[in-house]
Amino acid sequence: MTSVPSIDTGRGLTQVSSRAMTLLVSAVAAEALGVSPSQVSVDLAGDDGALDLTVRLLLADLPGGGDDTEAGTDSDSDSDDLQAGADETRQHIRDTVSELTGVRITDVTIRLTKTRLRLPLLGG
Amino acid sequence: MTGISPSTFPTSSTGGPEDTPAPVSDARGTTVINTSVIAKLVGLALRDVPGVHALGGTAARALGAIREALTTTDRSQGVSVQVDEGQVTVDLSIVAEYPVPLQQLADDARKAVILAIETLAGLQVPAVNVTINDVHLPEEPAEADEAPVQ
């Protein structure tokens, strides 16, 4: 898993764990997208003191996204609506995460999916 | 005069809040402050820092919950103290409240720890390393029952 860059304050290091960063990004993205944090999945990537964020969520979980059967018919308008605010949403996530963590965020990617994979629970 | 006697100090550091003494000598005796006491001071100081939800990692908090059930509380949970040549280095493991700014939280925790140790124990603190190991979300369910979206 990608480690979050630590910050040297002069009287000690401040490190944010990957788990903490992932949860925080999930919460920020969920607020921006109008869903709950449990409906959002986050990947962290990058190095050299900066991070790239990938936020995934189910299209049907978006407000107005409808259920799976309606997602096909409504997907065009939903996509248009999302596209219209996509840049603003990504900018909001980038700015808020940077402000809350002190870590530089270089890129935010939002991926909408139509299916939810149920993975076996892993320890840790 | 109260001073630190490097000759009586342990040269090796501890990996946790064990009872390696931190002696302070003066002309009429030696005061020994065990590192477990310093760790407890740190834990108490952090109680008043806004945004600190808990101390320690998942395993430490699980043990802490068992201790609380047994009506004892470990104030030094999530705190590691190392004493070397009269100087104290502290490692903290913190669960932060969302949406507190994490760097500000770490700075506040660091200042509180330095103030507590320097004021109450009279020891110098060159470094307080802070790890934010988890974030507590107010609406977070007790156990996630949704699989991650891929």
Image (cartoon, coloured by chain):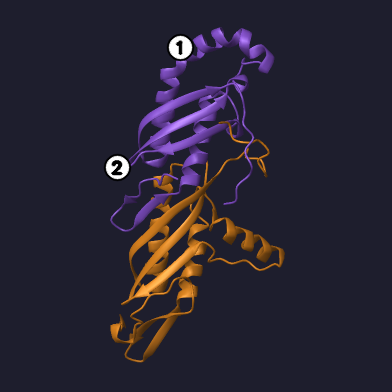
Chain colours: A purple, B orange
Which image quarter: residue B102?
A: top left
Against B54, residue B123 (above or below) is below
Residue B126, image x and y in percent? Answer: 31, 65
Return the mark for residue A84: 1
Q: Which chain's residue wears label 1?
A: A
Which quadrant, please, contains the N terminus of chain A?
top left
- Helix, strand, or loop for circle 1? helix
> Residue type at mark 1?
Ala
Q: Residues within 10 Å of mark 2 (few under 14, many from 20)?
A: few
Closest to the observer, A81 or A110:
A110
Which image quarter: residue A46?
A: top left
Residue under the image location 49 percent in, 30 percent down = A55
Q: Residues within 10 Å of mark 1 (few under 14, many from 20)?
A: few
- Helix, strand, or loop for circle 2? loop
Residue under the image location 40 percent in, 68 percent down = B117
Residue under the image location 61 percent in, 24 percent down = A115
Closest to the observer, A112 or B114:
A112
Drawn side of residue B83 relative to residue A23, left or right: left
Pointer 2: what residue? Answer: A48
Kindly report the distance in space between the C-alpha atoms of the residues bearing marks 2 and 1: 32 Å
Q: Which chain's residue wears label 2?
A: A
Q: Nearer the viewer, mark 2 or mark 1?
A: 2
Whether residue A67 is visible, yes or no, is: no
Residue B77, image x and y in percent? Answer: 54, 64
Mark earlier in primary sequence (2, 1): 2
Residue A110, image x and y in percent? Answer: 47, 25
Residue A11, image x and y in percent? Answer: 31, 58
Drawn side of residue A19 relative to residue B64, left or right: left
